[in-house]
Image (cartoon, grey):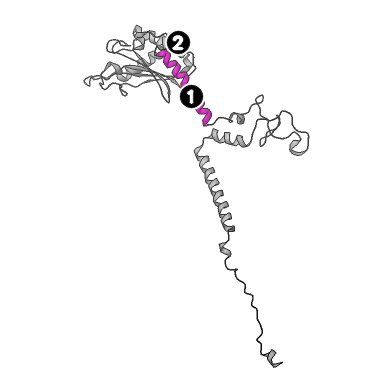
C-alpha cells in the first residue's frame, strides 16, 4: 500500500491556442474588393455622363430599355405576359406608349443616334463633297468645266463643308478692276457651279475677298468691294437656278485673309462658295 501511494499522479493539460489571429482572415478582403469595384463602376458612370452627348446618353438608355417590339403577338398569361409588356406594339415601359417602325416616337429616334452614326453620316457627306469636287475641277467623265475655267477653281473639304474657291490670275480677272461687275468668264463659271451644286440641298455661304490697296489711298474700298462682289455672286447663283433659301450668308472679308504672300497680288482677289454641312 505504501509503495503504491508514492507514485505521482499523471496530470494531462489541454492547451487551447488561437483566438487572437482573427484579423488575418480573408473575409475583409472580399468586402474591400466589392467596395473598390463599386467605386470604380461609380466613377466610370460619372465619366460617361460627362463625356457623352445627350443623343449618346439617350441611345445608351434605350439600349437597356428597348422600345422596338420583339413580337407583334403578346403572351396570354398573367402578369408580364398578359400583353402589357415591352414586347407588345401597344405598350412601352416607363411612358406607357408603344413604339415601332409603324408607330415611331421621338425616343425611338435616339436609337443609333450616337457617335457611330454621326461618323457614318460625315463619311457619306465627305464622299458626296469629293464627287462634286472632282466634277468642279474638271476630272469627271462628262465634266462641264473647260480648261480655262479649271485654272480659276480650287476645292477643298473642311469641317465647315466643301469650299469652292474662285480666284483671279494675273492675266484673267473674274471682275473688272475695282468694280463688282463680273467678266464673261466669271458668269460662265458661276453658271457651271450652280448646275453642279444643284444636285445637293446643302445651304450655301458666299464670301468675297480682295487684294490690298496702297496705303496712300484715302478711302480704301476693300470692304465695300469684297461685299459687293460676294453679293453679285449670290445674285448670279440664284439666276443660275440655286434656290434663294439655300443662301445662308453673304460676307465681305476685304483683304483680311490673304492667300498670297504679296498683299497686292491678283491671286488674293477671290470668291469662296461653301457648301455647308447639314
Q: Give 139 or 257, whichever is nearer the viewer.
A: 139
- Residue at image position (78%, 38%) is 78
Overall secondary structure of the magenta section:
helix
Of all residues, the one furthest to the top in this rendering is 184
Tag in front: 2 or 1? 1
Q: Give 62 or 175, whichever is nearer the viewer.
A: 62
Magenta stretch encompasses residue 139: yes
Q: State the SS at label 2.
A: helix
Q: Which residues are magenta?
A: 115-140
The image quarter in which residue 161 lies: top left
Magenta stretch encompasses residue 261: no
Left/right of residue 141 with respect to residue 179 in the rendered view: right
Tag 2 residue: 195
**Residue 172 numbered mark, or none:** none
Residue 162 image position (x, y, % from top left): 42, 20
Residue 12 image position (x, y, % from top left): 65, 78
Any part of residue 278 in sight: no
Tag 1 residue: 123
Left/right of residue 91 with respect to residue 209 in the rendered view: right
Amino acid at each position: 500500500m505504501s509503495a503504491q501511494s508514492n507514485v505521482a499522479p499523471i496530470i494531462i493539460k489541454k492547451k487551447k491556442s488561437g483566438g487572437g489571429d482573427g484579423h488575418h482572415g480573408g473575409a475583409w478582403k472580399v468586402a474591400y474588393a466589392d467596395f473598390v469595384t463599386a467605386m470604380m463602376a461609380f466613377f466610370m458612370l460619372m465619366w460617361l455622363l460627362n463625356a457623352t452627348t445627350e443623343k449618346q446618353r439617350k441611345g445608351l438608355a434605350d439600349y437597356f430599355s428597348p422600345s422596338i417590339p420583339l413580337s407583334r403577338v403578346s403572351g396570354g398569361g398573367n402578369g408580364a405576359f398578359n400583353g402589357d409588356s415591352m414586347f407588345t406594339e401597344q405598350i412601352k415601359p416607363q411612358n406607357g406608349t408603344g413604339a415601332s417602325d409603324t408607330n415611331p416616337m421621338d425616343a425611338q429616334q435616339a436609337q443609333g443616334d450616337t457617335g457611330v452614326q454621326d461618323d457614318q453620316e460625315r463619311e457619306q457627306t465627305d464622299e458626296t463633297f469629293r464627287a462634286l469636287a472632282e466634277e468642279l475641277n474638271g476630272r469627271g467623265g462628262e465634266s462641264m468645266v473647260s480648261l480655262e475655267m479649271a485654272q480659276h477653281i480650287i476645292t477643298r473639304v473642311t469641317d465647315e463643308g466643301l469650299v469652292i474657291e474662285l480666284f483671279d490670275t494675273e492675266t484673267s480677272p473674274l471682275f473688272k478692276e475695282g468694280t463688282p461687275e463680273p467678266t464673261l468668264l466669271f458668269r460662265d463659271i458661276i453658271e457651271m457651279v450652280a448646275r453642279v451644286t444643284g444636285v445637293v440641298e446643302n445651304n450655301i455661304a458666299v464670301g468675297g475677298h480682295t487684294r490690298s490697296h496702297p496705303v496712300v489711298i484715302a478711302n480704301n474700298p476693300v470692304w465695300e468691294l469684297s461685299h459687293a462682289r460676294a453679293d453679285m455672286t449670290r445674285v448670279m447663283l440664284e439666276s443660275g437656278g440655286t434656290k434663294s433659301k439655300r443662301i445662308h450668308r453673304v460676307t465681305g472679308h476685304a483683304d483680311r485673309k490673304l492667300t498670297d504672300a504679296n498683299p497686292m497680288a491678283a491671286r488674293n482677289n477671290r470668291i469662296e462658295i461653301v457648301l455647308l454641312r447639314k
